Image: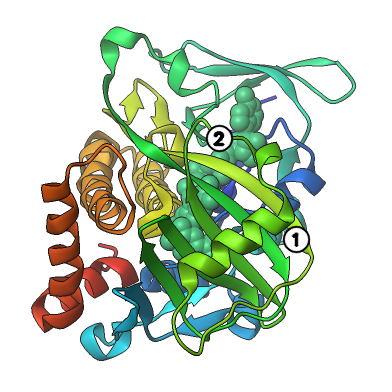
Amino acid sequence: MRTQVAIVGAGPAGLLLSHLLWMEGIDSIVLENRSRDYVEKRVRAGVCEDPTVKLLREVGLAERLDVEGMPHRGIVLRFDGEDHRIALTDLTGRTITVYGQQEIVKDLIAARLKADAQIHFEVSDVELHDVTGDKPRVTYMDSDGVAHEIQADVIAGCDGFHGISRPSVPDSDLTVYDHVYPFAWLGVLVEAPPANDELIYANHENGFALHSMRTPEVTRLYLQVDPADSLDRWSDARIWDELQTRFAIDGFALHEGPILERLLSPMRSFVVEPMRYGRLFLAGDSAHIVPPTGAKGMNLAVHDVLVLSRALKALLSEGNSDLVDSYSDTCLRRVWRAEQFSYFMTTMLHRDNHADAFQHRLRLAQLRYTASSSAAATSLAENYVGLPFP
Ligand code: FAD
Ligand code: DHB
């Protein structure tokens, strides 16, 4: 088989890249090791930045998002037993939209299949070959166990943090920046209406908690837990008890309901430089991870593939390699901004049991400053809604 761009991974990065390339008249094949059903049901991100929503609209992918997505004009920081609202829209003129990542994935798959795109699900043994030459190849096994080879002009490694693309690059050609936090998130999806119209980032002495949502009938909640913890130690009753404790302020109670899904997610910051090796381009979680507190991971993946699609158009349609040569630097500038913001949000909002009393006081001082100074609140808000795409 031959294509211009072989894309490994059908998450937001790989699918959106395939769509953007198609709009530029460039063909691609997407390989995904999970089933379509699995990727369409995988519950992950919820917050779309303003530039992400605008891009999805521009490229014809926002029909359902514009009906079902929930635009938000503010978020709440809950600490010291009180709510402190960060008025995102008053401070920046922009909004964020709550729309589940799996809904974006569903919309993308539907749009790609409508255009007769090749997405191969449930493949295995994906391997990359000759990526430093000008005829890279990808080999894999299809769902019936039949071996295939794709010859391409370039390969896009969009296969997430645990994929094979990044490990295909020799260690000596990548610099790794890795920071592991002493926190994890226990996330639950609940069949009950959200208890508040806006997201609540709560700082409590037992640890951080986050109130989010997916629809007017479905609430998304997270609890900070120890990374060594396990889901079987958290009964439904214990989860609700801890959530109600961490969100407790006068006049507020979470709406409880059946727990539809649960996950435990460790928190880390991770970046590799550069995001390119020969004709292999890394995009999204395969190149970088942020802790989820800043809601940036999927949004970064969207920015990466926008930059990559423009660069590949210049290379493959016009023979101009300037943009592929600057791809990594262009993306990394936004990646490091998001790494810093996510680190800031994470350290400000979580309870670190290894920190000393002095550090706890500093954290509280930062929270109070962020909530009371319009300069500090604006800084949080402009990062949270997302700095404009180039
Ligand atoms: P992925 O979504 O991981 O997609 C990679 C794809 O590659 C997967 O489908 C995988 O199955 C496939 N794959 C892996 N290995 C192979 C292989 N060998 N061969 C073929 N296919 C392979 N981000 C936000 O922007 N906002 C948020 O609010 C937010 N909240 C989050 C909350 C939680 C609890 C978590 C865990 C994450 C959150 N994120 C958020 C981050 C976001 O989910 C990720 O950054 C996003 O999924 C990255 O997209 P991606 O396409 O790069 O990678
Ligand atoms: C959600 C996830 C986040 O990481 C965040 O910061 C806000 C909301 C969510 O899943 O809804």
Judging by the rendered image, the residue that carries numbered circle 1 is 259
Q: Answer yes or no: is residue 21 visible.
A: no
User: Is 328 above or below relative to 44?
Assistant: above
Task: Assign a secondary structure to mark 2.
Answer: loop
Residue 58: x percent and y percent? 47, 73
Mark 2 nearby-residue class (10 Å; few <14, some 14–19, many ≥20): some
Horizontal side of 27 relative to 171 (left or right) equals right
Q: Quarter holding the N terminus?
A: top right
Kind of residue at badge 2: Asp
Kind of residue at badge 1: Ile
Judging by the rendered image, the residue that carries numbered circle 2 is 229
Displayed quadrant of residue 191: bottom right
Q: Quarter holding the C terminus?
A: bottom left
The residue mark sitting in front, 1 or 2, is: 2
| Rendered residue at 37%/78% (across/down) | 76
Mark 1 or 2, nearer chain start: 2
| Rendered residue at 51%/55% (across/down) | 223
User: Is 218 above or below relative to 318?
Assistant: below
